[in-house]
Image: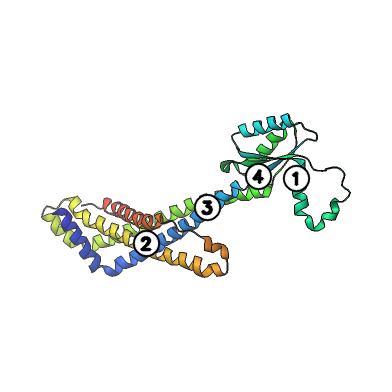
Amino acid sequence: MELSYSTKTALQSLMKEKWINLLSSVTVAASLLVSAVAILLIYNFDIFTRSLPEKFTMIVYLKDKIEQPEVQKLVAILKSREYVAGTKYISSEQALAEMKRSLREVSNVFEGLEENPLSSAIEVKLKRETVSAVSVKQISDEIKKMPGVEDVNYEEKIAETVYLIKTSVENLSLFILGVIIFIVLFVISSTVKILFYRRKNEIEIIKLLGATGGFIRAPFLIEGGALGLLGGIFAIIGASGFYYLTTEVFSAFMPILGKMVMPLEILVFIPVVGLLMGLAGSLISVGKLKL
């Protein structure tokens, strides 16, 4: 009975104060839309940054005339390190053959070459979580001290770029989440407070009839949840439009945008977040009211 009354009262208030509620829903929708777009971009950035470390390798150049048993021992040492995902041995003959294939248009430079000037090497693939500008430098210094190693080569700028992209995406996601939570809670709590004061006379009457604080607060909680849910639905519609424009229209100018992925979970996640934040905003507002 109490739930039925609360739901009926909340629906009547939503219809009666439709312009205030619509404005609040649109504001919440705009905030959640920013959140949805941010999640969409962060999700795709994360896919992109995950692939970068997987492509990052270090080339360990070996000393001249190193014996095969020493090479096998060095490979075993490298594989035992927690930061190594895989290794590949490249003999000097393989390195020279690869160079000739790469420079086949100027193959005459190899004419008269009596000795192979290239040294053997080991290609080391690092684990994703170890790729950062600082850690890669430390790993390089450690490998240089291993027996049979002449030098270590890696693209320092790539390591720095991978690290900066990953940390930037993480920090951006936390910042956006914090701002969105604050905006939505503020909008919902302010709207519920306005609705409360507009019905103050009605509330005073039902208080005199013996209504409890929970009975009076329930309709406002339902209203706040409804506003948050509605804002979330609007946000998903807007995010779907953004995704379509990005992948179908803007991709004509930037083909990489056509590879953007929209996770299906976001279609449920944003409305649910809107609902929960609507309830939270209502709780903040009605919790401060003296009934």
Identify which residue, 182 or 68, lies in the foreground. 68
**In the rendered image, which quarter contains the N terminus?**
bottom left
Disc 4 to disc 1, C-alpha distance:
16 Å
Q: Which residue is mark 1?
A: 95
Q: Which residue is mark 2?
A: 28
Q: Are marks 2 and 4 in contact (CB under 8 Å)?
A: no
Q: Amino acid at mark 4?
A: Thr
Q: Which mark is residue 141?
A: none
- Name the residue at 19% across, 61% down: 9
Q: Residues within 10 Å of mark 2 (few under 14, many from 20)?
A: many
- SS for dot 3: helix
Marks 4 & 1, CB-CB < 8 Å contact: no
Image coordinates for residue 107, horizontal then vertical, percent: 82, 55
Tell me residue 104's x, y (percent).
78, 56
Front label number (2 vs 4): 4
Mark closest to the chain's N terminus, 1 or 3: 3
Nearer-N-terminus badge (2/4): 2
Q: Nearer the viewer, residue 28 or 33?
A: 33
Q: Are marks 3 and 2 in contact (CB under 8 Å)?
A: no
Give the quadrant of residue 265. Answer: bottom left
Measure the alpha-carbon separation of dots 3 and 2. Answer: 28 Å
Marks 3 & 4, CB-CB < 8 Å contact: no
- In the rendered structure, which amino acid carries the disc numbered 1? Ala
Q: CA distance from mark 3 to mark 4?
A: 19 Å
- The residue beneath circle 4 is 57
Quick check: 98 left or right of 255? right
Q: Is residue 60 left or right of residue 284?
A: right
Residue sitting at x 72%, y 35%: 144
Please name the residue that numbered disc 3 is placed on.
47
